[in-house]
Amino acid sequence: MDRDAERNPDSAQGNWFVDKRCIDCGAARHVAPGLIVSRGEYSVFGRQPSTPEEVHQAWLAAELCPTRSVRTESHLRPPAGIYPHRLDDDVHLCGHNHRSSFGAHSYLVVRPGGNLLIDSPQFTRKLVGPFKELGGIAKILLSHRDDVADADKWAARFDAEVHIHRDDRSAAPYATHLIEGSSPADASEIEDGVHAIPVPGHTKGSVVFQVDDALLFTGDSLTWNYERDGMRAFREACWYSWTAQKQSLIGLAEYGFERLFSGHGPWSPRRDPTVMRQLLLELTERM
């Protein structure tokens, strides 16, 4: 084993482990909660998987980790079909998170009029075939400059449109469509049932995507917090303006949604839109 892939001794004894390349992006913990845990500056296996479901969660983590730090001593090969991983009737977690995005999640949303790729995973043949079977990619929606990853390769492979906000366009100069506006009040319709909502704060060109008045894809602007059973934002990772981000999220509360999917953090349970609105406003009060 390469020295940089050395087992972290804090991992529970057994076949599965996390190596020392871990950057503590937290992504593996979202698909293997309780199995993979944080140790401050890195993640480890808190215990070994002991059921078929937990073994599957370990493979979800292994095929998602941007540094490929989730490993086995026995060098097992992953089974086929780990990703895309269905989270909702129409929403699939892509896995294969990109290190340039610090392990941010990306999602494929299956829609009758053409599928949406929201932010980008690594470009890999492990996803090309499954994406094609699900109907390909019609549009790539980029929430902000940090999570562009291999969007250009996916766009070329599926001849897809690429949408990003004008203020973050330098991260995706190949974008075919630029989102305009400087507040949630400037929301625009990308297609029937899909809206781009500008939420400057994390970056100047941050955007949230609302799908069918039910699903909200938030990039790095906010995420779900299971410990609080509510929402949170990342003050320590706010690159443009915390004040602007707070005002953006206050404006975002005017848009209905039932479930939240973020780049850095877990996805929420489905809740009534009035509950989600209240939880979002509670977040802005704490900000």
Image: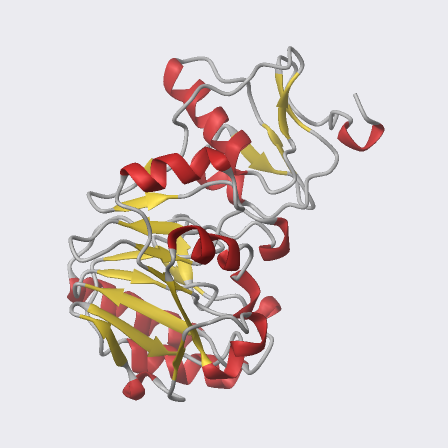
Left or right placement of residue 77 versus residue 56 in this view: right
Left or right placement of residue 26 versus residue 192 in this view: right
* Residue 236, quarter of picture: bottom right
Question: Residue 261, percent across and down?
Answer: 35, 55
* 4 vs 53, nearest the viewer: 4
> Residue most toward the right?
3
Residue at image coords 46%, 31%: 60
Quadrant of the snapshot with the N terminus: top right
From this viewpoint, is residue 33 visible? no
* 141 vs 14, nearest the viewer: 141
Residue at image coords 66%, 15%: 13
Above or below, comparing residue 91 to residue 21 in the picture = below
Question: Residue 194, percent across and down?
Answer: 23, 68
Above or below, comparing residue 276 to residue 265 in the picture = below
Colour approach in the figure: secondary structure
* Residue 21, quarter of picture: top right
